[in-house]
Amino acid sequence: MMRSARWAWAGLLPLLIFLLAFEIAPIFKLVASALTADRGISFANFGRAMTPTMTLAFANSMALSFVSALGGTVLGAIVAYAIITSRRSATRNALTALADVTANFGGAPLAFAFIITLGSTGVVTLLLKEVGINLYPAFRIYSIGGLALAYLYFQLPLAVLLMIPALLGLRGELREASTSLGATKSQYWSRVAIPILRPSLLGCFFLLFANAFGAYATAWTLTGSSVNLVTVQIGSLVRGEVQFDPALADAIAALSLLVMMICVAAYQLLVRNNGATGK
């Protein structure tokens, strides 16, 4: 028994090898390349990344991530509440399974789905045109607004999956106590439920922000290089379409990694504090 317990850690070896090969080693390689210049270790690559084009790329990526994360968090919380308060278990299970599937539907297939649906000759675009509603040119799926809509498609179900456990932890006794003390429904939500759910909502927002900030395939397939985003700039520098500069791409990627690490750390901190408060 003691001998088997002593070697139980060996079961983690495949995971550790995977993490070392595909997570830790690439990060070290990325940071080393970003800090390497002609004369050795230098921050020159980071200085070259501070051009107006790259600054605009970071501003666009942050704005797109903020809008899609905020929309996903608010709508996801509402949909999650509707799911858990559904009276039929079959409906709850079906909607939860649908959220699980759609949360993982992204990248190029999602972009093509939106082109077929809301492109200039998409199904919905043509149907609306038949009834006298012209989406184009006021709306374009190939713009940053269209990207926000596409991002919301996979952000919303992810928020649903994140908020369902938090909403299930909201005890019914709190509502009953508030009602017995004369509180209205809006007072219960504004003064009791939302303050309790605030760490979960903020944690969900930060996770969705990081998820959108690192998205690439959907943005590239849907808009190409017409929308200036961080991930699109990195891809362009690595492919060498206009300029082949992997060191600059690594510096931009390192800055992006820092943004996502802050978001993930904030999410972990909020979830941990929420768990400690729940205990």
Image (cartoon, rainbow, N blue to C red):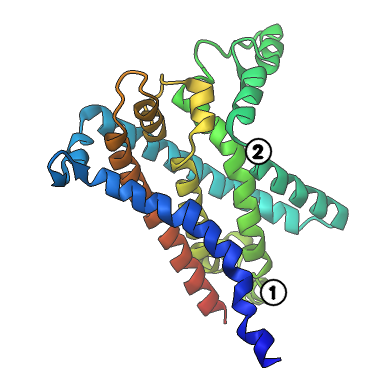
Quadrant of the frame with the C terminus: bottom right
The residue that appears at 70% across and 72% down in the rendered structure is 172
Residue at 35% over, 53% down: 28
Could you tell me how many numbered marks the image carries?
A: 2
Q: Residue furthest left?
A: 39
- Viewer-proximal residue, 194 or 83? 83
Left or right: where does residue 271 sit relative to residue 90? left
Mark found first going from the N terminus, 1 or 2: 2
Residue on which disc 2 sits: 105
Point out which mark residue 271 bears: none
Q: Amino acid at mark 2?
A: Phe
Q: Nearer the viewer, residue 185 or 141?
A: 141
Q: Which residue is mark 1?
A: 176
126 with respect to 150 (left or right): right
Left or right position of 90 against 154: right
> Would you identify the image quadrant in which residue 133 lies?
top right
